[in-house]
Amino acid sequence: MFCLAALIPSPPVLVPELCGGRPGADDAHLAARVPALREAVLTAVRELAGQASRWTVVGVDMAADRGPGEVGTFVTEAAGVSPGPSATRGEVLVFDTGTVGTFRGYGADVRVALSDDALEGNAPADPDLPLPVLIGGWARGCAGDGVTATARLVDHDAALAHCVELGERLRRELDAEPGTHGVLLIADGAATLSTSAPGYFDPRAQAVQDEIDDALSAGDRTALTTLDTDLCAELGVSGRAAYQVLAGLFSADVPKVETLYRAAPFGVGYQVSTWRSGAGS
């Protein structure tokens, strides 16, 4: 049975080993912006772990040309089988509990995994895992002992209908399972909110980010499903597809949302919240 979803962003600086500077001594350093964000993320994932020891991590695959033999396994959601030699829109990249990765490509060889057994085993750590899977593995490890996870990445260009369908299907799957299950959704907002942002500054971005933040804080599934796909792409809203999966996850449910963080410390919109299953709509 599904019980709770936690929404967190994906900046690698969440990982202490990747965050330079001395925020306690230098308030002007960029690192000083990280502790509040990290603490909100840890609060959310520990709450998730307190409710469920089995997680599904949901994120966005930004590598449009990734092949099925590189990382994970591509599956066709409708059939649940491998589609063959190439992956297309409408398919999901799946990672099992044995997945092990490292943040070496981000500056430090921090090993993470989707289960304790995988982390403690001898499997080589993959430096090319997509960032949402790495962050999911790190968050799982911070949440407490005994949490295991699988991960599903939806294509960043996935159509609204597919995203919502994926969320609805995941909810049915989890509700049909014994025990309690949680979802860790990893998504970032607009990356164009300041001149120092990864996508530089776009004057349209703040209004769109406010729309996203308001919808997430209110649990407004309709607003999430009406986001302009093309505009989100132009503004670097990399989490658009994942937000719409979240809307599908609660399509027949009125979520009880607690927002723990809402800001853009590096010119990228980040929100941390928990979505609890509520009354049927």
Image (cartoon, helix red, strand yellow):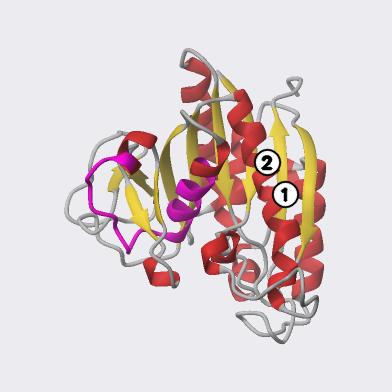
Q: Nearer the viewer, residue 55 or 78?
A: 55
Q: Dot 2: within a 10 Å radius of its alpha carbon, few (fewer than 14), some, or many (20 or more) residues?
A: many
Q: Do the residues labelled 1 and 2 touch (CB within 8 Å)?
A: yes
Measured as percent of width and height from the top left, residue 41 is found at 66, 49
Q: Which mark is residue 201?
A: none
Q: Is residue 203 left or right of residue 31?
A: right
Q: Which amino acid does label 2 sit on?
A: Ala
What percent of the width, then of the height, locates residue 31? 68, 72
Q: Residue at x 64, y 29 (%)?
A: 4
> How many circles with numbers are drawn on the protein?
2
Residue 229 lies left or right of residue 203; in this view the side is left
List the residue tagged with mark 1.
40
Which residue sits furthest left? 85
Q: Which residue is drawn at 72% across and 87% down?
A: 195
Range of residues picked out in magenta? 120-140
- Give the residue furthest to the front: 25
Q: Quadrant of the N terminus?
A: top right
On residue 44, the disc is 2
Q: In the rendered structure, does residue 134 fall within the stretch colored magenta?
A: yes
Q: Does the magenta stretch include residue 104?
A: no
Label 1 crowd bin: few (<14), some (14–19), many (20+), radius 10 Å: some
Could you tell me the amino acid type at mark 1? Ala
